[in-house]
Image: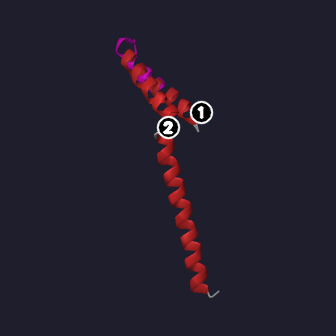
Amino acid sequence: MNRSMLLAAIALSFSMIVAGAVSWAQIDEQSPCVEACREAEDQCVDVCDVHPNPVECEENCQEAAEDCIQECR
């Protein structure tokens, strides 16, 4: 195998790995678990309107949603 064919094979392999990773990430973002985390975050943010510190409350909601999504994966 000459050098140009080897480089082409490496580039193709890298492209396939990247495409697989992108596909996995997109599927994961649409999973029922992730959707449930997003819905819980929305409900949490809705309650923040009556919280004494709404900004801090929303930050806590976002952090909880990120933790929830990590648990989905």
Residue drawn at x 42%, y 24% is: 58
Residue drawn at x 52%, y 26% is: 64
- Rate crowding at label 1 as few (under 14), some (14 to 19) or many (20 or more) other CA atoms within 10 Å: few
Q: Position of residue 28 (x, y in %)?
A: 51, 42
Q: Amino acid at mark 1?
A: Glu
Disc 2 secondary structure class: loop
Figure check: 18 above or below 63: below
Disc 1: which residue: 71
Q: Main secondary structure of the magenta part?
A: helix
Figure label count: 2
Q: Amino acid at mark 2?
A: Ser
What quarter of the picture does the C terminus occupy? Answer: top right
Disc 1 secondary structure class: helix
Farthest bottom residue?
2
Q: Position of residue 7 (x, y in %)?
A: 58, 79
Residue drawn at x 65%, y 86% is: 1
Q: Image check: 37 left or right of 6?
A: left
Q: Earlier in the sequence, mark 1 or mark 2?
A: 2
- Marks 1/2 in contact by CB < 8 Å: the verdict is no
Farthest right residue?
1
Residue drawn at x 36%, y 11% is: 50
The residue stretch that appears in magenta:
49-60
Label number found at residue 16: none
Name the quadrant containing residue 17: bottom right
- Rate crowding at label 2 as few (under 14), some (14 to 19) or many (20 or more) other CA atoms within 10 Å: few
Q: Image check: 18 left or right of 53?
A: right
Figure check: 32 above or below 61: below
Disc 2: which residue: 31
Q: Position of residue 53 (x, y in %)?
A: 40, 16
Indicate yes or no whether the magenta region holds residue 64.
Answer: no
Relative to the observer, which residue lies in front, 50 or 31? 31
Distance (Cα) linking label 1 and label 2: 12 Å
